[in-house]
Image (tube, rainbow, N blue to C red):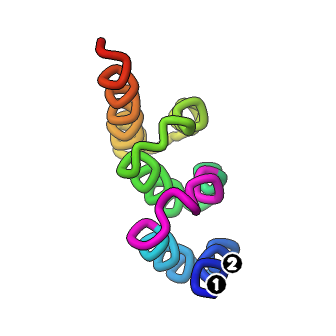
């Protein structure tokens, strides 16, 4: 089935295939793929890490907050670090809104 194909694409070597799969999974199966995408926060490729963080932020996957904090701590690129902090802030705001703070 299509979902399994896309999940398998996330393990491919080619960045293009993985980025395509991330986009389609977010469009069609956002919550079903969230745990797999969460693992991609530790990918060696910065573009993959950034897309995974964006995906998780956009679907409101607050379970990934601690993982995102760890990624931010390790990130060396200042532009990427700033964007990751923005994604983290979005997730933290969702928790604050849910708790009525």
- What's the mark number on residue 8? 2
Q: Secondary structure at mark 2?
A: helix
Q: Residues within 10 Å of mark 1 (few under 14, many from 20)?
A: few
Q: Is residue 27 above or below residue 20?
A: above
Q: Secondary structure at mark 1?
A: helix
Main secondary structure type of the part rendered in magenta: helix
Q: Residue 37's spot in the image, x, y percent? A: 58, 58
> As rendered, which of 87 and 28 lies closer to the eye?
28
Magenta highlight on residue 32: yes
| Left or right side of 7 for 80 | left
Give the extent of the magenta segment.
Answer: 26-38
Magenta highlight on residue 52: no
Q: Is residue 38 above or below residue 29?
A: above
| Left or right side of 12 for 24 | left
Displayed quadrant of residue 95: top left
Q: Quadrant of the N terminus?
A: bottom right
Displayed quadrant of residue 32: bottom right
Q: Quadrant of the C terminus?
A: top left
Q: Is residue 80 above or below residue 90?
A: below
Which residue position is annotated with label 1? Answer: 5
Q: Do the CB atoms of the residues marked 2 and 1 lie less than 8 Å apart?
A: yes
Q: In percent of the image, x 46 and y 49: which residue is there?
A: 56
Q: Residue 72's spot in the image, x, y percent? A: 51, 35
Q: In percent of the image, x 58 and y 62: which residue is there?
A: 33
């Amino acid at each position: 089935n299509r979902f399994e194909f896309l999940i398998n694409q996330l393990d491919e070597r080619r960045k293009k295939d993985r980025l395509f799969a991330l986009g389609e999974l977010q469009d069609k199966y956002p919550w079903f793929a969230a745990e797999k995408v969460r693992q991609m926060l530790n990918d060696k490729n910065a573009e993959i890490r950034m897309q995974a963080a964006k995906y998780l932020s956009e679907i409101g996957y607050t379970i990934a907050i601690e993982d995102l904090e760890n990624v931010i701590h390790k990130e060396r690129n200042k532009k990427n670090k700033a964007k990751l902090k923005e994604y983290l802030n979005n997730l933290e705001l969702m928790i604050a809104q849910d708790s009525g703070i």
